[in-house]
Image (spheres, grey):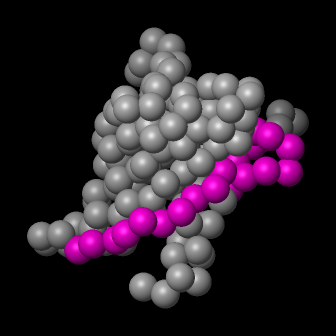
Amino acid sequence: MKRSLWIGLAAAIFGSLACGAADAAATVAPKGKHALAGDQVLTALTVSYAPGETSGPHRHGAAAYVYVLSGEIRSQVEGERAPRIYKAGESWFEPAGAHHLVSGNASRTAPASMLVVFVGPADAVLTTPDKPSAAPD
C-alpha cells in the first residue's frame, strides 16, 4: 500500500480522537495490514502521545490488542471500575465494540507510545469517536 494511503488511513483512524495537549494530535504510524482467513484483516499501527495528551471516548469496530512500547498509558474500558495505568511491556485486549472511556499518556512530562493490533472484518470502521452530547434546550 502506498505511503500516502497509509497516512490517510492513520488520520482517519485516530485524527479526530486527540483532545489533550493544545494544538497537538496523537501521532499514528501504520505498520502493516494483512488479510486473514475469511473476511478478516489484521491492521497494526503505533500511536504516540505527547506528555499529557489524551484521546476522547471512542469505540473500535474490530478487536484490539494493545502493547505499551514506551512510557505509561492510562486506559479504561466501560465496565472497569477505574482507569488503569499500563507501563512499557504491559498489554491489554479490547473486544470489538467495547466503549473505550479513557486513553492517553499518564505522564505530563514524558512521551508514551503503544502498538495497536486490530483484527476484524475488512470493512470495519476501526475507530469511532463518541458523538458530543446535545446541549439542553
Front residue of this view, candidates 91 and 122 = 91
User: Which residue is pictured at 37% across the width and 29% down the height?
Assistant: 90
Find out whether residue 18 is within the magenta segment. yes
Front residue of this view, candidates 64 and 109 = 109
Q: Quadrant of residue 118?
A: bottom left
Magenta residues span 16-35
User: Which residue is pictured at 59% across the width and 48% down the height?
Assistant: 48
User: Which residue is pictured at 64% across the width and 43% down the height?
Assistant: 49
Q: Position of residue 19 (x, y in %)?
A: 75, 43
Q: Is residue 132 visible?
A: no
The answer to whether residue 58 is above or below residue 15 is above
Q: Is residue 66 visible?
A: yes
22 horizontally vs 94: left or right: right
User: Which residue is pictured at 58% across the width and 83% down the height?
Assistant: 4
Front residue of this view, candidates 23 and 136 = 23
Q: Quadrant of residue 27?
A: bottom right
Front residue of this view, candidates 86 and 16 = 86
61 horizontally vs 129: left or right: left
The answer to whether residue 66 is above or below residue 4 is above
Which residue is farthest left? Answer: 37
Find out whether residue 20 is within the magenta segment. yes
Q: Position of residue 47 (x, y in %)?
A: 54, 51
Q: Quadrant of the C terminus?
A: top right
The answer to whether residue 86 is above or below residue 45 is above
Q: Position of residue 6 (x, y in %)?
A: 52, 76
Q: Quadrant of the N terminus?
A: bottom left
107 horizontally vs 58: left or right: right
